[in-house]
Amino acid sequence: MKALLDTHAYLWMLAEPARLSPRARKACSDSRSVLYVSVASAWEVAIKVGRGSLRLDVSLAELFSQHRRSARVELLEVKLSHTLEVAALPHVHRDPFDRLLVATARLEGLPILSADDTLDDYGIDRVW
């Protein structure tokens, strides 16, 4: 399976895998899966850490380098086309990071691994 990880799914995969659904946990543990985390997720985590609403046990750099590589997760750069696609999305979700992840998933042809069922209203494939 190929999938784009929502920010919470990436964090849970690394630190709290029991919070993942059985299907998501299987996708994350299957060595044949190709999982991606967006640079947008790193930005989202950095903002939350900076304002104190999220605490990490490791540095942000470790989270998106060493831990990402050990979990076999590929980093997906944000492209101009991803940001422009956000304008084409219906106004279902107010979170700008989720909107960018949805746009990225649409353009890259990837399902998104997320517990957020609001994303279903975008007509994308969501794995949970």
Image (cartoon, rainbow, N blue to C red):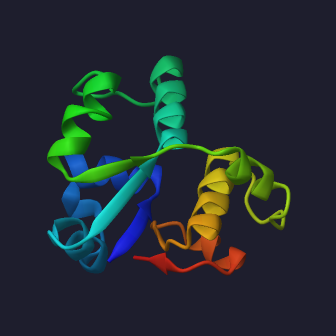
Asked whether, in this view, residue 102 is left or right of residue 72, the answer is: right
Residue for point 68% across, 55% down: 99
Give percent across and percent down for residue 75.
Answer: 39, 45
Compared with 77, 6 (above or below) is below
Quadrant of the rendered structure where residue 85 is?
A: bottom right
| Camera-side residue of 122 and 16 | 122
Quadrant of the rendered structure where residue 23 is?
A: bottom left
Count the marks: how many?
0
| Camera-side residue of 99 and 68 | 68
Residue for point 19% across, 33% down: 66
The image quadrant where one finds the N terminus is bottom left
Residue for point 66% across, 51% down: 100
Give percent across and percent down for residue 126.
Answer: 50, 76
| Camera-side residue of 35 and 51 | 35
Compared with 13, 22 (above or below) is below
Residue for point 64% across, 66% down: 107
Asked whether, in this view, residue 109 is left or right of residue 16, the answer is: right
Compared with 8, 125 (above or below) is below
Give percent across and percent down for residue 111.
Answer: 49, 74
The image quadrant where one finds the C terminus is bottom left
Give percent across and percent down for residue 74.
Answer: 33, 51
Asked whether, in this view, residue 67 is left or right of residue 113, the answer is: left
